[in-house]
Image: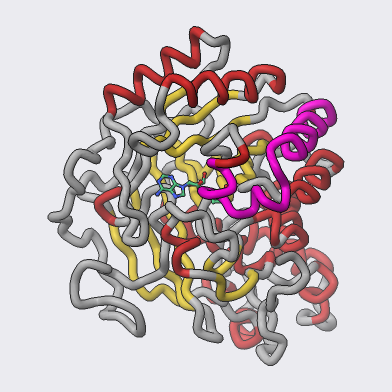
Amino acid sequence: MRGESPGPPSLLDVPGLYDMGRAELAGLLPGEPDYRMRQVWDGLYRRGLHPREMTDLPLPLRRALDDRLQPMLAEEARRTSADGRTVKWLWRLPDGPGLESVLMLYRDRATVCVSSQAGCAMRCVFCATGQAGFDRQLSAGEIIEQVMTALRAARPRRLSHVVFMGMGEPLANFDAVWAAVERLHDDVGLSARHLTLSTVGVVPGIHRVAEARLPVNLAVSLHAANDTLRDELVPLNRRYPLDVLARACADYVAATRRRLSFEWACIDGVNDRRADAVELAAYARPLGAHVNLIPLNPTPGYAVRGTPRRRVLELRAELAELGVNATVRATRGVEIDAACGQLAATGPDVRGAGGRGPGPPPVERAPVAVTPVGLDWRHGTDNPSA
Ligand code: SAH
């Protein structure tokens, strides 16, 4: 996985809008005074502007930048939930792969959920991205571009939080993800405490997060607290089993003093019994971890159901009794296939005629008719950590 996967194609020699470092950008501004560089940099990162919108620059310079700085993400489709609070983009990369990002609007702020890879190689059985497979790594700029689009779309709300919970395994694309994290913090001005990396348990990556300069949040997608079941649900567990994972988590907690969280997709009859709660509590308690219970969202390739809501609430209570804090994550965007585990870059409407390939023109506020039976979780508690 790490190192073996193809990166962004080098044949595309034009660097993306957000892939340029300061030195490269300065190279595009020969003979210009220093403050021009700062203007462009601020335009890109503070204001989320495209060079052609930087009206404080002289027109010839604006044009020159416009020719040289190309956005990498082409909007192929955009869907908005019926209540207008969740927006999902399907982006097409210049070399073909698709990826998705999801914007969640709250009253006066917003969270964006970004992809770190086009596709995913982890093959978790219940996840639509895992079912579809891996295309390629994303560059730091391709990750940042997702955030900047969301930042603009969220206005007048402030985009305050970024969660790396879209397509892909962030810690299997560590360098690009970390470069994006640093730029989001240093240049966009987001707080490290509002950046969350979610991993299925790539242990070397967790150690690197523990040692890193910025104390970002770490969420570990656990789903099972015994190796037999976890091997089945999350194939990476065969490489980094639970005891090894627990040591890496302890390292993260000790080094950063941040609270760790575990994601637990509740699957009917699979990991939602009292015995599962007991195992989970025994695993989470020594690490002081918080548990996010996510009712399983439907995906085409996994024929089981999410745990009924009543039982999810009982699980939360059982965990509390066992000394573990848990919250039930409100799932946003189920009806536009934008919820956890549903991102598959399959086009504007996987149920309709859209499908893969170049789709119809971008759709805004697509009428939504499909609500998966028994999975209407939109009225739960909003996840406080997101
Ligand atoms: N690869 C990283 C980042 C993806 S985050 C990781 O696994 O953590 C996506 C989150 O949604 C993970 O917690 C994942 O386990 C969860 N998820 C995947 N499929 C799901 C589904 N069908 N229903 C609910 N949650 C799901």
Quadrant, the N terminus: bottom right
Q: Residue at x 54, y 10 (%)?
A: 322
Q: Start and end of the magenta stretch?
A: 229-255
Residue 45 vs residue 276: left or right?
A: right
Residue reaching furthest to the front? 228
x and y percentages locating residue 304 in the rendered image: 32, 47
Q: Residue at x 66, y 38 (%)?
A: 218
Residue 4 vs residue 291: left or right?
A: right
Residue 113: tell me if it is visible: yes
x and y percentages locating residue 117 in the rendered image: 59, 65
Q: Residue at x 59, y 54 (%)?
A: 235
Q: Looking at this view, is 25 or 75 the one in front?
A: 75
Residue 55: tell me if it is visible: no
Above or below — where is 280 with respect to 229?
Answer: above
Above or below — where is 271 with respect to 28?
Answer: above
Whether residue 110 appears in magenta in the rendering, the answer is no
Q: Residue at x 58, y 32 (%)?
A: 225
